[in-house]
Image (spheres, rainbow, N blue to C red):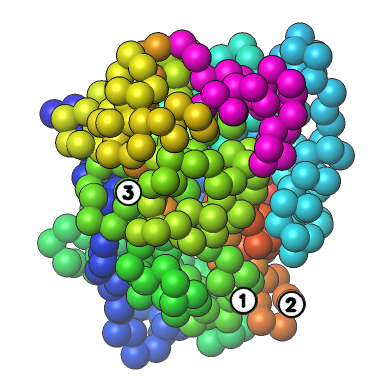
């Protein structure tokens, strides 16, 4: 089994896991106790080899930092980025102009702030939206390829998402991992950081980290310039989720099992502040008791959702938290996503393969008529046909009964038709470590902790109460690139 296939296998295998183990607890008598000696010294130590960590390391190396080590607790690189849909939100003058889409960093800023109930840090949002296109171009300069047309991703609120040309978010890892190695970055897997070491309790610069290898042996690594933390969120940690919102204790997750948030308390131990920890996002995924996630919902224009009564219940281009709450209010907290052959053809290859596997597992269905599809789904054929006909009529009239934006109204008419379960799975944790626009970690008194950066889903304050679809990939690569530059410049 190749590394990529192994990642995909793990992604589908854990998608429906309920009750994953909580983050490991590390009994550290004194989190700031200095080691007797440092085993090795690097200029920069990056914790986490997902998209954010790899981007930070590559950017730092490109800007002159020579001695960089990445520590990854899993046995492979990529993290959640490797199993994500990969949609990257950014304004894009050439692509959007070709589609008659008017956009700007200011519009992206406005959408992001409003989509998160204005609870995001405006400075962070401005930094992201003003630098996102440069991050896209940066990725393209290293060989990343995107499809020529942008689209409105599920929960994205505007057509500015860029789809990887190949398959899934793993495309980014295929570009960044070899680039990092080419630049001399060292990557160690099976290396779990158990302590971030600061000069004094709640004072002074961060000096390095302690990690344990596969055999459980401790290693102390000195970081002369910075420790960059990029270990993701806590979506796969039911106990931590429930600490901040009890509704999410027993839900499934779309995350890999590495997303346990175990670095958050370690950083709090040395004074780091957190923000928005109860802002937790769900996406359509495995209903309770199922184990294979099928994705048909990424393009808001291509799908509708119905309940077990075969009736629609929400505008499919609404905010993700609105759709989450609508699904969780359904009987059994489960609905269905429905697309036609045109919508299916526009899915990424990885999602198409996941849907075909769903035919075998009983999580997806396909048929040449809506009535036949309904029978396979176990819903009323007459009602489902009526629902689709009414939706198509609204598409023709450019007026949807649930308020779906006219630009996202496309008829469901071309056979074969497809459907899959749409329960709710924990997808993203918007809260995390507090940072400034240079991704420097801020302590509980509002002061910068020297020589410590955080980037990606580990951080909070960028998305507010609700993250727009496509903004996570935008976040990790925009701020990953900027983190490398900030470290190189001594910030």
Q: Position of residue 69 (x, y in %)?
A: 41, 48
Q: Position of residue 170 (x, y in %)?
A: 39, 30
Instruction: Identify residue for label 3.
Output: 286
Image quadrant containing the C terminus: bottom right
155 or 458, nearer to the observer: 155
Q: Secondary structure at mark 1?
A: loop
Alpha carbon separation for disc pair 1 and 3: 33 Å
Name the side, left or right, on which 91 lies relative to 196: right
Q: Position of residue 94 (x, y in %)?
A: 76, 13
Q: Residues within 10 Å of mark 1 (few under 14, many from 20)?
A: many
Residue drawn where x is 43% and y is 40% of the image: 310
The mark lying in front, picked from 2 and 3, is 3
Q: Which mark is residue 326?
A: none
First in sequence, mark 2 or 3: give its number: 3
Q: Which mark is residue 273?
A: 1
Name the side, left or right, on which 250 lies relative to 137: left
Image quadrant containing the N terminus: top left
First in sequence, mark 2 or 1: give its number: 1
The span shown in magenta is 388-414
Q: Residues within 10 Å of mark 3 (few under 14, many from 20)?
A: many
Instruction: Identify residue for label 2.
Output: 446
348 or 441, nearer to the observer: 348
Question: Can I make out residue 242 in this image?
Answer: yes
Q: Is residue 344 found inside the magenta-colored segment of the image?
A: no
Residue at the outermost front position: 382
Q: Is residue 387 above or below residue 427?
A: above
Q: Is residue 410 found inside the magenta-colored segment of the image?
A: yes
Q: Secondary structure at mark 3?
A: loop
Q: Residues within 10 Å of mark 2 (few under 14, many from 20)?
A: few
């Amino acid at each position: 089994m190749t590394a990529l296939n192994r990642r995909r296998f793990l992604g589908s295998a854990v998608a429906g896991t309920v009750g994953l183990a909580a983050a490991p607890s590390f009994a550290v008598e004194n989190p700031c106790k200095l080691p007797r000696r440092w085993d090795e010294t690097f200029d920069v130590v990056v914790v986490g080899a997902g998209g954010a960590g790899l981007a930070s390391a590559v950017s730092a190396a490109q800007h002159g930092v020579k001695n960089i080590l990445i520590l990854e607790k899993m046995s492979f690189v990529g993290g959640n980025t490797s199993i994500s849909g990969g949609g990257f939100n950014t304004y894009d003058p050439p692509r959007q102009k070709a589609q008659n889409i008017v956009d700007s960093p200011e519009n992206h800023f406005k959408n992001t702030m409003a989509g998160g109930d204005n609870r995001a840090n405006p400075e962070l949002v401005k930094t992201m939206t003003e630098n996102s296109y440069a991050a896209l171009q940066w990725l393209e300069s290293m060989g990343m390829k995107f499809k020529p047309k942008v689209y409105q991703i599920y929960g994205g609120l505007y057509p500015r998402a860029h789809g990887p040309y190949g398959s899934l978010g793993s495309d980014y890892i295929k570009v960044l991992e070899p680039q990092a190695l080419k630049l001399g970055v060292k990557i160690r897997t099976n290396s779990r950081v158990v302590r971030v070491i600061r000069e004094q309790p709640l004072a002074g610069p961060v000096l390095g980290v302690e990690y344990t290898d596969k055999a459980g042996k401790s290693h102390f690594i000195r970081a002369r310039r910075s420790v960059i933390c990029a270990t993701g969120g806590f979506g796969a940690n039911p106990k931590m989720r429930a600490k901040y919102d009890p509704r999410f204790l027993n839900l499934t997750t779309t995350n890999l099992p590495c997303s346990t948030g175990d670095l958050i308390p370690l950083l709090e131990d040395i004074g780091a502040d957190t923000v928005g920890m109860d802002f937790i996002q769900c996406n359509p995924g495995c209903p309770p008791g199922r184990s294979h996630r099928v994705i048909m919902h990424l393009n808001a224009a291509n799908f509708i959702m119905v309940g077990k009564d075969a009736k629609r219940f929400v505008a499919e281009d609404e905010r993700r938290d609105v759709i989450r709450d609508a699904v969780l209010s359904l009987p059994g907290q489960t609905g269905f996503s429905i697309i036609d052959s045109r919508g299916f053809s526009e899915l990424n290859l990885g999602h198409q393969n996941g849907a075909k596997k769903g035919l075998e597992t009983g999580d997806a269905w396909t048929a040449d008529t809506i009535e036949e599809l309904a029978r396979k789904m176990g819903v009323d054929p007459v009602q489902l046909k009526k629902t689709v006909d009414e939706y198509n009529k609204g598409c023709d009239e450019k007026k949807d009964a649930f308020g779906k934006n006219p630009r996202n109204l496309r008829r469901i008419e071309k056979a074969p038709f497809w459907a899959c379960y749409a329960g709710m799975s924990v997808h993203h944790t918007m809260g995390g470590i507090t940072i400034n626009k240079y991704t420097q970690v801020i302590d509980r008194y509002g002061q910068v902790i020297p020589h410590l950066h955080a980037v990606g889903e580990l951080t909070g304050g960028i998305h507010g109460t609700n993250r727009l679809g496509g903004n996570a990939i935008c976040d990790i690569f925009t701020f990953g690139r900027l983190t490398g530059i900030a470290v190189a410049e001594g910030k």
